[in-house]
Every structure is written in structure tokens, then in C-alpha cells.
Amino acid sequence: MKKSILALALLSALGLSACNESITEESSELVNASPIVDAGEEQTVAAGQEVTLLATIIDDDNVTISWSQVSGSTVTLNQSNSNTVTFIAPELQQEELLSFKITVDDGVNSPVTDTIDIIVAAVESSELASWLINNETSASYIQSASRNVLEDVQSAEVVDIDENNISTKYVYVQASGIPKYAVTITQEIVNQLNQRPKAISDFSSGSTTVVVGQTVNFGEDIGFNSSQENCLTTGGDGYWPPGPGCPTEQNKEAHFPVEPAEIADNEEDCEVGLGKIGLMVNGTSIYNWGDGMSEGDNLWYNLAPVAEQYDVDVCGGHAAQGDYHHHFYTNCLADLVDDDGSKHSPIYGYAADGYPLYGPYESENTLAVSGWKTRDYGADTSQGGCSSEGERSCVLVDQYDLSKGVEQVPNGPSIGENVTTLSGNTLPADDGYFFEDHYYGGEAVEGSQLDQHNGHDSNDGKGYHYHITVAKGQNNKLVAAFPYTIGPNFKGKLASNSISQCGGDAPGGGMPPPPRP
């Protein structure tokens, strides 16, 4: 009996052992799983941009990869047999969705696929995005004959114009020319207003009527004895100091080439002239460096940001024949486009040649640097001076090349000598007061350094562009730096339908300098 029980126990044990061996053998067989594929996240890109698709693939085996386009305008895929593929986004008239599929095959399982969508913005989008479009709000203090004037830009669109049987694209802009500026008054602003040299006569009551914390809208009365030109009829009385007239609705129409054409080295330069040389993104005009006045016979031309410092409003602008414009940087526009110096400035406007004008910052807390320098009149003539300390007795033969020497001319005001402006203010003609006080230094155009046109292409995807130039003054306050916006010559050609012309002659913009030799 006991033997039988023992035998049964042995058989049971042997059977269990055999069963365990079978289980172990089966579980040791590996299962080849299919690859795991992720084509990546959806992207929105601009026309002409290089797009990178980077897929994530998880698999232990060697796999075969292939990308293909599923839908949308056809593009050329580079390295389509890799997990990373690139292509150039096409130029499209309307936004379009492009879909791509990646297929991964491990040679064992069925191929695995995943798709990714790429949204390509229309060509117009990048060209139009910067303009401040408004068809709802009107200026509180500037009127036309029957109504208050709409603020900023009313429309911006890309149009095709036939020129000699060639279709050319332009950004067509319509604007009133009246900005939507609102300034919160600080103690610094109050002090600047009340410390004007002629405050007693500039203001009706001898000082400004604004107080700290008050918000002043464009054209609102702050106590100035304004000009009689337009101010009592279409508005703005009390907002502008004596001298310039008040602005009026301009109904501007401007064409900016979508693809600017650079002026070749062997072609004649195109000087920025008087009047409009571009538009800010809010429709206000950009004027050049000058105020249209000189201290000599076609010589010693004033710089507007210096000579007109007491002729502008709290936003640094004023009007010429009703056309409100800026010669230099303005905090008011910086606020509108959210430019606080934390990154590369956004677009502030467009020059007449089509190139964009960016604000003063090249990167975080780094200003773009003007390539123009101030002469030392006491230096040797080989260094651009006149060998006459404090005396303006010569001009440069070529402001772009000091090696060409100087030319003796009738003396201009001595350095620091007082001169009287159009508005009757007395200012010292310090070095840098006149156009002839400056020359192009020829520094290597890299990083934040700008070229002779006040622009550069820093290979950051923005292409060639101008910068508004400023420098840090006392207490790090930003002060205008020559040539301020664009110029003295345009980088690009002006089209026949341009809002400007080479060396153009219109009020309030400064006489153009002699052509570059």
C-alpha cells in the first residue's frame, strides 16, 4: 500500500516537472512586436521656410523608412528614407494644409504608418500681418468735414499690377494718417513740458495743463498755444506746440513691393528726400533726417530730431501740410507694437522701397548700432577733420570714404554756437547738429552693426531690413541716433508708383545732400 502511494507520488512529481518544462520552453520564445511610430506635432509655417519633419521610431530591428506626401501642393522631400525629412514650404495665395505620411517596415510585421499636417500660411499673411488695421474706432479730437477720422490703417492687401506685361506684387495700403496714440502722463513728461525754453509763451497759462497719471489721447488739449493751421477747424488745438500746423485726414494710398529690388553697386544711388519715405504700421508717415533748413548756401543742413526737438508733440511727431509724421523713434508706437526690448524689435513700418523698418532692438536689451559716426573737426584732414578745433571750415569730399579728403567751404556755425530754430528756440550747434557733421564708418556689418543705409541682413530669417536707431543717453534714456530711420540712401529701388522719389522735394523732410561721388 505504501509502495503504491509512493509510486503515485513519484509519477505526479514527474508529470508536474514535465509540465513545468513545457511552460518554460513556450515562454522563452520571443514575439517580434511592430514598430512604434510618431510623425510629430502639427506645424504652421511661412512660405519659403525650410520645414523639418522629425519622426520618433521605437523598434529593436533594422527598419525601412519612407515618407510620402498625402495631400496639398506638391513639395520636394529631401532624405525621404530617413526619420528626418526637410522641404521648402511653397508660396501660396491662400492658406493650405499639407499632409505627409511616414511608413516604417521591420520586415516581419505589417508596415506601420503615421501622418502629420503642416499648415502653410499664404504669402500675403506675412506681408500684411504687421499693419494695424482699424475700421471701428475714430480719433476723439481730429475731425474731417462731417465726422471724426478713423484711426490707423483701414486696409492692406496684396495686389498684382501689370508693368510692361510683367505682373508685380505690391502691398497696397490705405490709411487716414491719424494714429491711435494714448499717453499716460508721468512726472518726467510734465517736467519736460514745463522746462521748455519758451514755456511761458508756448503754453496759454505758462505751463502745461496735464497732471501725472492723466491719459492724453492724440490731439487732446494739453495747454499749448497751437498754430492756427487746421487746429481750430479739424481739431488738435492745444496738443501741438507753436509752429507746426495740426494734422488732417490724409486718405493715404501706398504701394510697397512684396519683393524689393536692391540697387546694384554700379547703379546710381537713391537719396531719401523730403516728405514721405515710408509708412509706419499705423499709417503715419516716415520722414527723413532733415527739417528742410540749412545754415548756409546749400550747406550745413539741420537734423530734425535735434533742431525740431521743441516742435513735436508728446509722441515725437508733428505735421507738415496736414501730414502727421515721425523723423525718429517714438515710445508711442513702441507701445502699440509691444516692443519692450526683451527680444528683436517687431516691424515698425515699411520704407518706400519695400524693405521693412524694425524698431531699435537687435536682440534682448541689445540695440542695433548705426554705422554713422560724428566728425572731429579738430582732427587732421586725413581723419575727416579740418585741423581747426571747434570750427566747421570744411566738408568731406565723400561721406562714405574719409580717404578722399576734405573740401574747404564757407564756415558754418562754430561747435556749440547758438543757432535759432524755425520756432524761435535757441539751441547750441554742438558737433552732430548738422548733416555734414557725420560720416559712414565702414564697420563690418555683422551682429547688431548696421550698414550705410541703416539696415542689415543678419541671417535670422528676416532678410534685409532697416532699423530705427537710438543710443542710450543719461540714465539709460533712449535718444535718437543718426540717421534715425532709413538712409541717407535707400537700399532698394523705388517703383514708379512709390510714395516717395529719389531726392524728393516736399515740406518738412530736409533737403537731400549732394549725391555720393
Image (cartoon, rainbow, N blue to C red):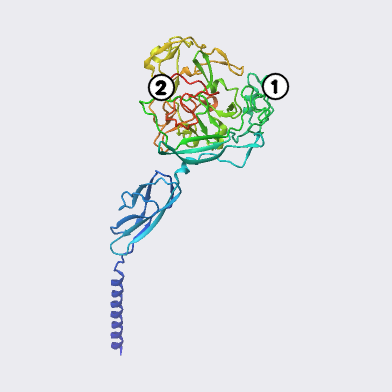
Outermost front residue: 165
Q: Amino acid at mark 2?
A: Gly
Outermost bottom residue: 1
Count of picture labels: 2
Secondary structure beneath dot 2 equals: loop
Which image quadrant is residue 204 in?
top right
The quadrant of the rendering that contains the N terminus is bottom left
Front residue of 240/478: it is 240
Q: Position of residue 505 (x, y in %)?
A: 51, 23
The quadrant of the rendering that contains the C terminus is top left
Left or right: where does residue 170 sit relative to residue 55? right
- Give the mark nearer the N terminus: 1 vs 2: 1
Q: Position of residue 307 (x, y in %)?
A: 56, 20
Which image quadrant is residue 47 in?
top left
**Residue that appears at 61% across and 17% down:** 425
Left or right: where does residue 31 sit relative to residue 184? left
Secondary structure beneath dot 1 equals: loop
Outermost right residue: 205
Judge whether 357 appears above or below 301 on screen. Answer: below
Front residue of 277/307: it is 277
**Residue that appears at 40% across and 44% down:** 49
Q: Position of residue 287 (x, y in %)?
A: 52, 27
Q: Amino acid at mark 1?
A: Gly
Cα–Cα gap, marks 1 and 2 = 44 Å
Q: Which residue is mark 2?
A: 441
Label placed on residue 206: 1
Front residue of 350/203: it is 350
Q: Position of residue 8 (x, y in %)?
A: 30, 85
Judge whether 157 appears above or below 77 on screen. Answer: above
Q: Are marks 1 and 2 in contact (CB under 8 Å)?
A: no
